[in-house]
Amino acid sequence: MSAASEPPVTVPAPPAVRTGPQTFLARARRSPTLMVGLAMTLLLLLSAVFAPWLAPFDPSAQNLTGGLLPPSAEHLLGTDQLGRDVLSRILFAGRTDLRIAFLAAIVPFVVGVLLGLVSGYFGGTLDYLIGRLVDTVIAFPFYVIVISIVFAVGTGEGGIYVAFALVGWVGYTRVVRATTTALRGSGWVAAARGGGLSHGRVILRHLLPNILPQAVVLLMTEIILIMVAVVTLGYLGLGVQAPTPDWGTMIHDGQAFITTKWWLSALPGLAVIYTGISLSLVGDGLGDAWRVR
Amino acid sequence: MTDPRPLRPRRALTVAALAVAGLIVLSACSTGTASTGTTADAEPTAGGTITLGRVASVTSFDLNNEITANNAFAIDKVFEPLVAFDADGKIIPWLASEWTISEDGLTYAFTLRDGVTFSDGTELTAADVVFSLERHLTVGGPLPLDAPIGSIVADGDTGVTITLTEAYTPFLAELSGFQNGIFPADFQGKSETDFFADPIGTGPFVVSEWDPAGDLTFAANENYWESGQPYIDTLVYKLIADDTQLTQQLKAGQINAIDEVNSADVESLKSSADITVETVGSWEIEQMFMNTTNTYFGDRNVRRAIALALDRDGITQATTFGTAEVANSLIPPTIASSANDEGYALEFDVDAAKAELAKSAYPDGFTATLLIASGNSLRAQEAQIIQESLSKIGITIEIESIDIAAFRARFFAYDFDAMLNSGQSDYPDPDALVSFQADPAGFSKSYWTSYENPDVTALLDEGRTTADGADRDAIYLEIQKILAEDVPYIPLFYPSTLKATSSTVHDLTVLPNGSIRFQDAWISE
Amino acid sequence: MVLGVVLAVFFLLRLVPGDPARMILGERATPESVAALRSQLGLDQPLLAQLGDFAVSVFTRGDTGTSLVYNVSTRELILQRAPVTLQLVALAVLFSVVIAVPLAVVAARHKDKLVDHLVRIIPTVGLGMPTFWVGLLLIILFAVTLKWFPVGGIGTTPWDPLRSLVLPALSVSLALTPPLVRSLRSELLEVFSADFVTTLRAARIPERRVLFVHILRNAALPTLTLLGVNVSYLIGGTLVVEQVFGINGLGSLLFSAISNRDFPVVQGVALFCALSVVMISLLLDAAVYRLDPRMRRA
């Protein structure tokens, strides 16, 4: 038996005031996960930003007699039911879905981190109340909220932003609160307060930078989850308005042809997975570089 | 270092992933085998079960208070009307074996068929007919009996005389609807709720097991008036909420009939040897409706320009894969007096469309919203084609897609610019459709378009009171001509009623209202 | 907390446009008949009166009302539909644990080697896979092409409902597994280096015993909590999978109830979900208490 022959296991260090940027960057550069993730994400973002130039056709250009064609030299990924080029639509759908996912992630992030900081820092009744609120939101059947809001506001982007603003902040709050509570007990917070710094300053200047890494890693995951939710809503027929292309609606529209023209549903799904992988790797990589995992 | 844990799960996953990719490629390459078409046996064999997959469950048998298909097509298995319509929409004798209509069109004398009993053995008498129709008149209901009825009188046990206060030609067609089915007088002494929880009718089937939120099982009515029929023992209405699942389960042999077929699947189903696709022209018309109280759509030239800008052939082909028929008039060819072949419709011509728009108050175009209900792929595709077509003449369309409940709330409040929806007739008389869609005094105000044309209204009244024949035809042709010129709505296509069964199921009768008659159906080996 | 959920759902539903009576009767029904139905269903009552009726119903009959669409008590509907969904969730949890635990252990013990990297790809890939898409692929592969499982619905063979639930449960577990793998692996790594493990090893206790009895037990705690949170989400969240596979469970009931504005049913399912979450949390707390030797001694 050789416990000794195993490589020494590095235990993730507890969050502490970061040493200078140099160390972080050095770790970042050496992390293949982060590098690959960033490369993939860059590719993704570039293809979304430059879609109007990259796409061979106008994604809305219909050709009613040329529908449902298999991949060919002219249409690399074939055409959909209305004769629109699938490749172009996938590229443009990327713009829509990525934009929505990133935008929808902002409010929950800000709200969640703030609530977590406040809750963990002040403790007491405030913490208790926020905790109960968190529990209630978690107990809420997610789809009841999202679908109801989408029905109320109308299908399309608005409903998604509202829905996630209302329920998406919970994950951040929990994580940030846990870390903040742990930090609050440590010596330097008391020292800072003793030195006359206001609550606000302590929270924003000192605590925030320490919890930010964990929150950002979580942000990557949350963006992916929002993206998947947007796609799922599109599949249920409640997604982004036509004719704006969206991966979820493309999967939904292609479902009727799934046994004969499977690529119409499979390819947009792969695009979603690719996005998931890219952001996941970035999240993991950042986590490694910041030593939060 | 030995690893005590098996690596099997991880390897299995990798293998599975590769297999998925491989098999997807293979399944895409495989082609369906062409149907060789087995000839059906002439002799029906008794026995067996037909399991019909449907997307909604049956929630009530109270026929006078129902209108939606999920209940209507279960009700019509248990209760039957005095007269019925066949697959061509012709009125045929049913519980009434014959009838006479007086010269002035006011008195209808029906003679009841011999030997008809309810499923519990009690004989059908005139008293039951009187009770049933009067109850419908009292209740009103979502599909009320509109005929101007003066009196309903039993004529002995086997005759019923109905006297109208004025001539009303659609009367027989109205009577043929499921909502005018006959049930026992006084509900056999039971309360209404109890009676409809366990309904007793003259129909070919009896309810045996019923889950209002799930499946419904019918057993054959031993006492059915067509002796020896129905041939099958059991009919099951199975709830399958997803329409892709419907097709999948049929193909996999889990069920042997489905109530709805996606037009996209028709080709592949037809080419499968194990599956038969049944189709019949329906009484539905897919249309684009325009709110004539809207600033832009109130302008007749604008509406005409839009009609000229739409390629109805292209829309029909692209969205229904050739299973629907292009619409050239409001009344479909499955109903009498259809003007479909008369050439009244404005034909696709982009230049003419631009010219027409130039004559309007908005020659440079405008922006408007097209409202549709979400969750319907076909409508979404239609909307996108229309959006594209209208952009070519300078009209920018924004598609607003909201969930069906909100959609209904919107257009009921007349809060829309234009919408996509479908018109439908409940019985085979042109009046049903045209009244609903062109009568400004009707509760929908011309299908929510608020269209009003005194000429049309006068013709409508005339049509209702003129007896069937060439004169009546001429009236409805004239109405359709005017509608084609004023275009408050643009008929796009007539969807077909599509059902599919396993090829062991024979002799279903598919009706143009979407229902199926199972009396003659049988299952072969 | 449960109360909060239920009240929120009650009011949220009535804020959304759409009339249940109109949904039941369709578009061509006369306005009179729709009004009559609304009255019959009590929808024209003032809001507070409706809330009162609702409260009475819940506390005296344990029922959130009669379904507007099906005319059956909500409690009955839920009791009928819940078993399938619970079976689905249970099976999915089983699959997830069976897949996640071995993978996490292998990855943790061979940290930074190829195996570890390969396993770490799973959460990465799995996170972005929409469940319904996975479901569709599974149907094409295992049901349509290989014909090992039914394409949907719940069959009636002796192997059912288990056999019919395999593919749906697998789809769901492919969403559950990635976070579990990640969390468990991470916890295991921490525990591996903990002092008491070194002590145990020094005492020459067999590796297998060390692994199963002590390490897993400790690492499992936070992961169990994570599992609990995810499962709670699942109780109402199976609706997509149920749609794809044509399963008439709680999820599809919820979806059609929301679409039809069937208020009592949506309220009922929401209440059920909230209660389930509470129950699962309690069960988990108990499990954690049992598993954690430190807590027991305290």
Image: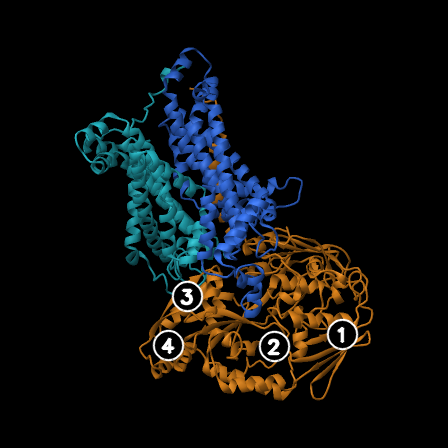
Chain colours: A cyan, B orange, C blue
Amino acid identity at mark 4 = Tyr
Callout 4: chain: B
Crowd rating for badge 3 (residues with CA inside 10 Å; few <14, some 14–19, many 20+): many
Q: How far apart are marks 4 and 3 (CA)?
A: 20 Å
Res. A32 visible in picture:
no
Q: Distance between the residues labelled 1 and 3?
A: 49 Å
Crowd rating for badge 2 (residues with CA inside 10 Å; few <14, some 14–19, many 20+): many
Q: Which mark is residue B96?
A: 1
Quadrant housing the C terminus of chain C = top left
Query: Could you confirm whether marks 2 and 4 are on the same chain?
Result: yes
Crowd rating for badge 4 (residues with CA inside 10 Å; few <14, some 14–19, many 20+): many
Nearer the observer, disc 1 or disc 3? 1
Q: In which quarter of the image is residue C34?
A: bottom right
> According to the image, label 3 marks what residue?
B384
> According to the image, label 2 marks what residue?
B335
Callout 1: chain: B
Amino acid identity at mark 2 = Ile
Give x and y (percent) for residue B65.
63, 66
Which badge, 1 or 3, comes first in the chain's sequence?
1
> According to the image, label 4 marks what residue?
B296
Which badge, 2 or 1, comes first in the chain's sequence?
1
Give x and y (percent) for residue B331.
56, 77
Callout 2: chain: B
Q: How far apart are marks 1 and 4 (CA)?
A: 52 Å
Quadrant housing the N terminus of chain C = top left
Q: Which mark is residue A7?
A: none
Q: Are marks 2 and 4 in contact (CB under 8 Å)?
A: no
Nearer the observer, disc 2 or disc 1? 1
